[in-house]
Image (spheres, rainbow, N blue to C red):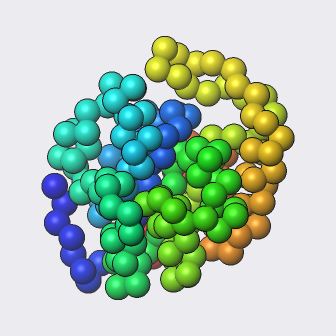
């Protein structure tokens, strides 16, 4: 497990209950150094549905789970522990809450506090087009996001300190560019 070095800020990476290319997101995430992983309760369930063992993830990075009502780890943003917040993949439910300013879970609270601390967020929503292919535990499927979900995705694009990506490739580029800009 990576030790936390207070002199070098890290990435805070949240995984919600979306299976949208979760395996590819996790594969990229596990190539990175200095990452703390935050799991929503649904995110934890989705990892199990996809056969991803949390022990394997923990062997590489610290994992925080959504177990406390006040989400104590969000205080790390105020102490300069994180230079970037990543939500990938992100459910339409989480996007909707973030757009409305609701911070009632670990992940939505992380997004809120990152913004309040002017820490850039990279967000990979699961609902990005009226018709799209996504991954399910049994393979690829077609989904047809609702208009309200697409509107929320569009709205979060306008939020300060937020970069919305539409694919795993864009996620990799955005995170890599952020790290390069920090010379990490």
Q: Residue at x 76, y 67 (%)?
A: 158
Visible residue check, residue 86: no
**Residue 109 higher or lower than 171, as above or below:** below
Along the viewing direction, whichever of 8 and 77 lies nearer the viewer: 77
Spot occupied by residue 130 in the image (x, y as percentages of width and height): 81, 34
Along the viewing direction, whichever of 37 and 178 lies nearer the viewer: 37
Q: Residue at x 58, y 19 (%)?
A: 140
Q: Residue at x 48, y 46 (%)?
A: 16
Q: Quadrant of residue 116?
A: bottom right
Spot occupied by residue 71 in the image (x, y as percentages of width and height): 38, 67
**Residue 4 higher or lower than 19, as above or below:** below
Spot occupied by residue 73 in the image (x, y as percentages of width and height): 33, 70
Name the quadrant of the N terminus. Answer: bottom left
Q: Residue at x 62, y 47 (%)?
A: 93
Along the viewing direction, whichever of 163 and 14 lies nearer the viewer: 14
**Residue 40 higher or lower than 139, as above or below:** below
Name the quadrant of the C terminus. Answer: bottom left
Spot occupied by residue 165 in the image (x, y as percentages of width and height): 64, 52
Q: Is residue 166 left or right of residue 137?
A: right
């Amino acid at each position: 497990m990576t030790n936390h070095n207070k002199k070098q800020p890290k990435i805070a990476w949240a995984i919600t209950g979306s299976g949208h290319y979760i395996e590819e997101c996790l594969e990229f995430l596990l190539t990175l150094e200095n990452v703390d992983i935050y799991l929503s309760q649904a995110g934890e369930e989705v990892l199990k549905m996809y056969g991803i063992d949390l022990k394997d993830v923990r062997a590489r990075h610290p994992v925080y789970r959504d177990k406390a009502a006040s989400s104590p780890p969000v205080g790390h943003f105020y102490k300069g522990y994180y230079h970037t917040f990543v939500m990938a993949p992100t459910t339409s439910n989480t996007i909707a809450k973030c757009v409305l300013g609701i911070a009632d879970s670990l992940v939505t609270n992380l997004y809120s506090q990152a913004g309040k601390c002017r820490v850039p967020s990279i967000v990979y929503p699961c609902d990005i087009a009226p018709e799209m292919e996504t991954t399910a535990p049994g393979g690829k499927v077609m989904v047809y996001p609702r208009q309200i979900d697409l509107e929320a995705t569009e709205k979060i694009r306008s939020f300060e300190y937020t970069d919305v990506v539409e694919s795993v490739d864009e996620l990799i580029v955005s995170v890599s560019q952020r790290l390069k800009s920090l010379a990490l």
